[in-house]
Image (cartoon, grey):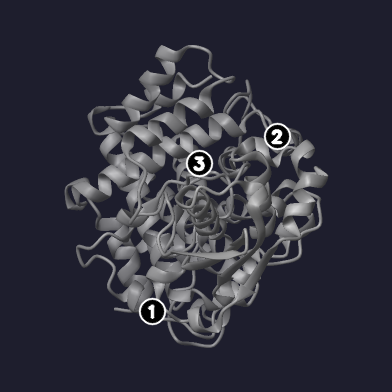
Amino acid sequence: MNTLESLAGFVSRLRYEDITPAAVHQVKLSLADATGCMIYGSKSEHARNVKRSFQIFASTSGSRVFFEDWKAPASFAALINGAMISSMAYDDLHHGATVHCGCIAVPAALAALGLQEDAVSGKDFVTALTAAYETMIRVAYSIMPEVRIRGYHPASVAAPFCSSAAVSKILKLDEEKTLHAIGIAGGLGSGLMSAQLSSDIHGMQAPYAGIHGIHGAIMSKNGVHGVRELLDDTYGSFLNTISGKHDDSWLKSVGDGKFECQGLGIKYYPTAGSVSSALDGVSAILEENSLRPDDIEEIVVRVNKSVFLHCGFDYVPGPVSGAQMNIAYCVAALLVCHEVSAAQFEPDVILNPEVAKKMALVHVVHDESMDNMGKDFGYYTKIEARANGKTFRKEIIHPKGSAQNPLSQQEVKHKFLAQCKGVIADRDLVDSIFESIMNIENIKDVQTIFDIIK
């Protein structure tokens, strides 16, 4: 049995009863958070532009586009809904694998509901998401950090694996057709990290790549074959080509009873996950030493090579994604505004000369001693702050919102309620949506939950 056969077997055979309670809970939290991010993102200019771009495919049939009175083919509906989820870089993050799963798996699974005549139960929906998350995380583990150092967007590279797993489960494809669905889609992901510098597409690269997984499942259902050797050590195969330094043990051990999706994190800041440790560290230095932001004379942030390339670039004010991905900008915004929320990525803050002045005090440094420390140290950050003639230091290994430093269910709900504010006026309805998702295993038809989101 080769690696793809093993992976497809895991996806095809996975049952709700096989999933650990901890994994089920984390998947439900991720689903709730992705739903909140989609609701919040629906009002963004980015989402409106994406909808306008694909409205030419509008139809009375197909899959639902949320907050619109038209539908679209499943792949485009998933892209649009996924773009809403990821529009403010506020969606879930697996800190070890450095991928966002919710903006791929959730819209793909929702779009697949439009391809399936039978009702999909809450348990089956959670099972599909778990299969998708587990697949994406293990693929990312296999190719990180080399894939990001090379300049690829890890979430976009792994997205087709995720969406093909989700849709294969919803469509109830057998093991062989699941293999071909993944084998068709897995090699089609892409996305370059340069998108964060001067474009509006960074947040939609992964949802766009996820289209291939939906197409892969549909084609496989209709008899099209994929690459069976996709994950083997052969010429042109995925692991060899996309990442010269790979570790396929993560894929070979899938189905061993351990669920890596238990490590899903819910973001505390609407920024790149690689920025969050620096924000935690600077905030702690200010609070623990009773310092005012104006006391700061210099801040040095030390990170590994992968984080430095991703978030240590020289920032020039431009698209929102560049600000969200940049450590110096986010730290400066924290010093000026005393918080980092969605408001800190509005034009009046991005172009604020006071933020520019504070940015000049922040220096991001690649510390070679922090390279190759392993997956648990991917966001390890050392902060040195000079203030009032003294130097203050802080080290952050696990930022707030990571699996090792998680948000509580109540904190996730607080974030959900805040995201819905201004979009869904009925507070009781918002409460009902969240609680229904957290009790989704008792729902016979998940469509009933999502039908009330308008």
Distance in Å between CA atoms under marks 3 and 2:
15 Å
Outermost residue, left direction? 17
**Front-most of residues 122 and 317:** 317
On screen, 142 above or below 255? below
Residue at x 34%, y 67% (from the top left corner):
7
**Mark 3 and 1 residues: CB-CB less than 8 Å, in contact?**
no
Which label's residue is closer to the chain start, 3 or 1? 3
**Mark 3 and 2 residues: CB-CB less than 8 Å, in contact?**
no
**The N terminus - image quarter:** bottom left
Where residue 248 appears, x then y in whole percent?
A: 38, 79
On screen, 32 above or below 194? above
> Residue beneath label 1, please?
248
**Mark 1 and 2 residues: CB-CB less than 8 Å, in contact?**
no
> Residue beneath label 3, please?
107
Where residue 102 appears, x then y in whole percent?
A: 46, 46
Q: Amino acid at mark 2?
A: Lys
On screen, 99 above or below 428? below
> Residue beneath label 2, please?
51
Q: Amino acid at mark 1?
A: Asp
Q: Secondary structure at mark 2?
A: helix
User: Mark 1 Cα within 10 Å, few/some/many (few <14, many 20+)?
Assistant: some
Which label's residue is closer to the chain start, 3 or 2? 2
**The C terminus - image quarter:** top right
Q: How many marks?
A: 3
**In the visual, does 419 lie left or right of 335?**
left
